[in-house]
Amino acid sequence: VKISTTTDTSVPLLVKTPGNEILLAATGSGKVLVGGMHLDAKLNISGSDTSKLISAAGTSRGVAFYVSASGETFVSGNIIMQQAEPRLFFSNSVGTGLGYLGYNSSDNIIVQNNTSNKHIVFKTNDNGTIKEGLRLDGAVPEVVVNQNGASGDNNTLVDFRVESDDNTHMLFVDGGENKVGINTSAPPEAFSVVGNISGSGTLQNVGATLLGNNLNVSGSTVMESLTANNITNVGLYSG
């Protein structure tokens, strides 16, 4: 079957329903229409807002892909982006770029928010409640854990924990109790360390110091005042 025309504005092929609705049409300018008179591209498909405009299915697996008139795109399977620097871009309703997810030329994964003073937020489902786990704060250049606390619509996971090879709580911030612990899962004070502490330089303390065991000092110890029940030492100097 050969259908031809001499003008771009003509419609040499037109198939309609008994109700006069367009099923299929072809224009002289090389455009094909399915379901309506939408003419923005070479292939134009129209339908109601609830219609699936394009659908692809396998013999045994069912629908693998469809595009609906409401703007929804469904994929059952993997999406392969083949490009030197593949990226998935996001924009608002007027086309302004909001950010992207992709790779750069150094093969690093990039998560970028282009909106000024806005954030990148990671959330998860905690026993049925969506909570924030980590925030890259664009308004104040910080990496923030537990920014919103445990209340409100944007409540967070509260605690922060770093593991070592043999310790699940090598560093632990108990957000609910406002305490920080090293080598402990239950810090009893605002800052608690289980194990030896080694340092260089000056250790300055404002307030009382309570020792539950020995204090070993290599060098001089300078104190403005000292109150103790029992001191055993050699060369104690009070300045």
Image: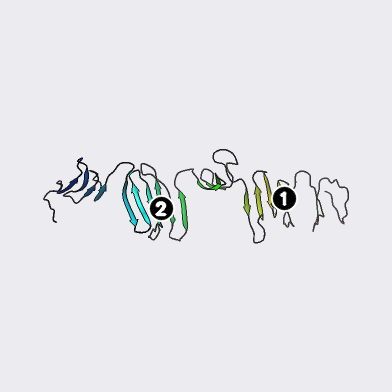
Residue found at x 43% / y 55%: 102
Secondary structure at badge 1 equals strand
Q: Where is residue 176 in the image (x, y as percent from the top left)?
A: 65, 43
| In-front residue for pair 185/137 | 185
| Mark 2 or mark 1: whose residue is earlier in sequence | 2
Left or right of 220, for residue 17:
left
Q: Residue placed farthest to the top in the image? A: 152
Give the residue type at disc 1. Ser
Q: Where is residue 190 in the image (x, y as percent from the top left)?
A: 71, 46
Q: Residues within 10 Å of mark 1 (few under 14, many from 20)?
A: some
Is residue 178 shown to the viewer in this render? Answer: yes
Residue found at x 69% / y 53%: 182
The answer to which image quadrant residue 46 occupies is top left
Residue found at x 66% / y 53%: 171
Is residue 134 shown to the viewer in this render? Answer: no
Q: Where is residue 34 in the image (x, y as percent from the top left)?
A: 24, 47
Residue 135: give its label.
none
Secondary structure at badge 2 equals strand
Q: How crowded is mark 2: few (under 14 residues within 10 Å), some or many (20 or more)?
A: few
| In-front residue for pair 194/51 | 51
Left or right of 16, for residue 199:
right
| In-front residue for pair 81/66 | 66
Instruction: Pick the quarter of the image with the N terminus.
Output: bottom left
Residue bearing the label numbered 2? 88
Give the residue type at disc 2. Leu
Residue bearing the label numbered 1? 192
